[in-house]
Amino acid sequence: MFEQKTAILMGQVDAAGVVFGPRLLEMAHAAYEAFLFENGWSVQRILDEGWALPMVHLEADFSGPLRLGDLVTVQLSVERLGGSSFTLGYAFVKQGQVAASARSVHVALIAGDKSPLPDDFRHILSPHA
């Protein structure tokens, strides 16, 4: 499991001071990019190598409020690793409790066509599955 600590910032909350739903998905994607960087990858590297990993499904659930200034640990795990796709799960943990969760499904494409995940990329996902 990959973990990233973050704080809930002003631009992520609504007028009531709680995380605005779409911002949770932005925070999940930021954790995904941090995971890539920690493993020697980046979205730019993927694109430079001539393939892409678009998200084909996103979902999020809140089980408690995430408020301005809260310190949160985003826990990223690989829920499913297929031949050409993978599913990432995200838990947003505040004070030891999961306050929100999210899920994203990504599919490998080369020139717009579904493609197997490259072995060296699959290698970084496997330990987190």
Image (spheres, rainbow, N blue to C red):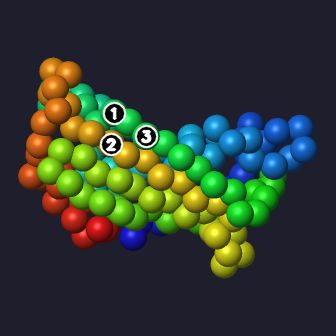
Which residue in the protein does label 2 denote? 106
Instruction: Tell whether label 3 touches label 2 (CB within 8 Å).
Output: no
Q: Which mark is residue 54?
A: 1
The three-letter amino acid code for the residue at tag 2 is His
Quick one: label 2, few (<14), some, or many (20+) residues within 10 Å? some
Q: Give the camera-side residue of 9 and 63.
A: 63
Residue 45 at x, y percent in the picture: 24, 35
Which percent across, then down, holds residue 33?
41, 46
Of circles 1 and 3, the one toward us is 3
Where residue 88 sits, quadrant-wise, is bottom left
Residue 77 higher or lower than 115, as above or below: below
Q: Earlier in the sequence, mark 2 or mark 1?
A: 1
Kind of element beneath mark 2? strand
Residue drawn at point x = 39 percent, y = 70 percent:
1
Q: Is residue 3 above or below residue 22?
A: below
Q: Residue furthest top?
A: 111
The residue at 22%/38% (across/down) is 108
Nearest-to-viewer mark from 2 and 3: 3
Please provide percent x and percent y for residue 24: 62, 46
Q: How far apart are labels 2 and 3 at the CA level?
A: 7 Å
Q: Amino acid at mark 3?
A: His
Question: Against 126, is 106 above or below?
Answer: above
Q: Is the Cβ of the residue at disc 1 closer than 8 Å to that at disc 3? A: no
Look at 50% across and 65% down and name the residue there.
Answer: 75
The amino acid type of the residue labelled 1 equals Pro
Query: Residue 110, position in %: x, y?
Result: 15, 28
Q: Residue furthest right?
A: 16
Residue 85 visible in the current orientation: yes
Q: Are marks 2 and 1 in contact (CB under 8 Å)?
A: yes
| Location of mark 3 (residue) | 57
Q: Give the SS element for disc 1.
A: loop
